[in-house]
Image (cartoon, coloured by chain):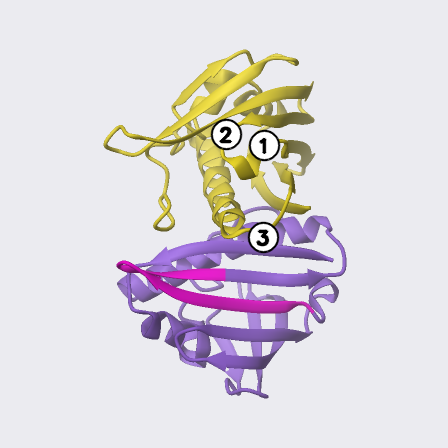
Chain colours: A yellow, B purple
Amino acid sequence: MFDIVHRIGIKAPATQVYAALASLQGLAGWWTEEVQGNDQVGGRIEFTFRALDGTVKGSAVMAVEALDPSRQVAWRCVEGPAEWIDTRLTFTLAEHDDQTIVLLGHRQWREEVEFTAHCSTKWAIFLLSLRDYVEKGTGRPSPNDVKIDDWN
Amino acid sequence: MFDIVHRIGIKAPATQVYAALASLQGLAGWWTEEVQGNDQVGGRIEFTFRALDGTVKGSAVMAVEALDPSRQVAWRCVEGPAEWIDTRLTFTLAEHDDQTIVLLGHRQWREEVEFTAHCSTKWAIFLLSLRDYVEKGTGRPSPNDVKIDDWN
């Protein structure tokens, strides 16, 4: 098993960061503009990622496993890239001084492959987008996300 | 044991990316401005990280374990944050089409702690700095690196 972890601080209350992680509207502000489904526990959220020319680059469906307001959002990937199936995603929040610290875990990859490394860097890009979205009101969700390599 | 991995593509020949990873001058262009030591195999390189006000935030000494021109740079951390001691760092290069793909591994952490998550995000920040340095001639080495949280 292989885990990706990240940490970022956002100058905003945890309630605001939580809203960006736990609602369709929030998620569309920083991860991908194309989000649909049911964002409640037991629901499924579908994320579609496109290139700037509109072609679909990928998609994923997350089952919402836990929502603990201002503390944690937990998903299980149920559809998407083969390497992602049954991986777990958690966003854990804690207020420290004037920041909300977000710990991201994208865990239980069956093995470490080159795509894991790509996704690790890409998660950092999206956490920067999350920070901009919460702090400034404008993130860089797909398809306007920062591209990092020949895969995206 | 816990490993951090990342992947970035740089629009430049591998020789140029390698120079940014294997020489003191190159490293000072994207990781931290304060680099000294011996960048040859068997040598030790000392990296110092400061805040913008000049106070030292941290330092690390890497033993250069392998240099394979245009292919790989490998270090072992011999001094620095306790969690880094004896971790292994590898930068592996491969040219794909018009990009050099860099795979970063920061491996053999004894355990995953919150600092691991911080360093993972920070490595992505520094790989973006490496890309800017190689592609545009200007990176954002410490102390002018993008800050990500309450730790740096």
Q: Which residues are magenta?
A: B87-103
From the viewer's perspective, is the residue at label 3 or at label 2 nearer? 2
Residue B56: x percent and y percent?
60, 68
Which residue does the image show at 47% across and 48% down from the upper left?
A: A118
Crowd around label 3: few <14 · some 14–19 · many ≥20 (10 Å): many
From the viewer's perspective, is the residue at label 3 or at label 1 nearer? 1
Q: Contact (CB < 8 A) between labels 2 and 1?
A: yes
Q: Is residue B144 visible?
A: no
Going by the numbered disc 2, the residue's amino acid type is: Gly
Residue A80: image tag: 2
Q: Are marks 3 and 1 on the same chain?
A: no
Crowd around label 2: few <14 · some 14–19 · many ≥20 (10 Å): some
Secondary structure beneath disc 1? loop
Which chain is mark 2 on?
A: A
Going by the numbered disc 1, the residue's amino acid type is: Ile
Q: Is residue A134 visible?
A: yes
Q: Between A43 and B137, which is closer to the camera in this rendering? A: A43
Residue B42: x percent and y percent?
59, 88
Q: Is residue A47 left or right of residue B85?
A: left
Residue A47 among magenta residues: no
Residue B94 among magenta residues: yes
Query: Disc 3 and disc 1: Cα gap in Å?
Result: 23 Å
Secondary structure beneath disc 3? helix
For mark 1, what is the residue?
Answer: A85
Which chain is mark 3 on?
A: B
Residue A36: x percent and y percent?
46, 15
For mark 3, what is the residue?
Answer: B120
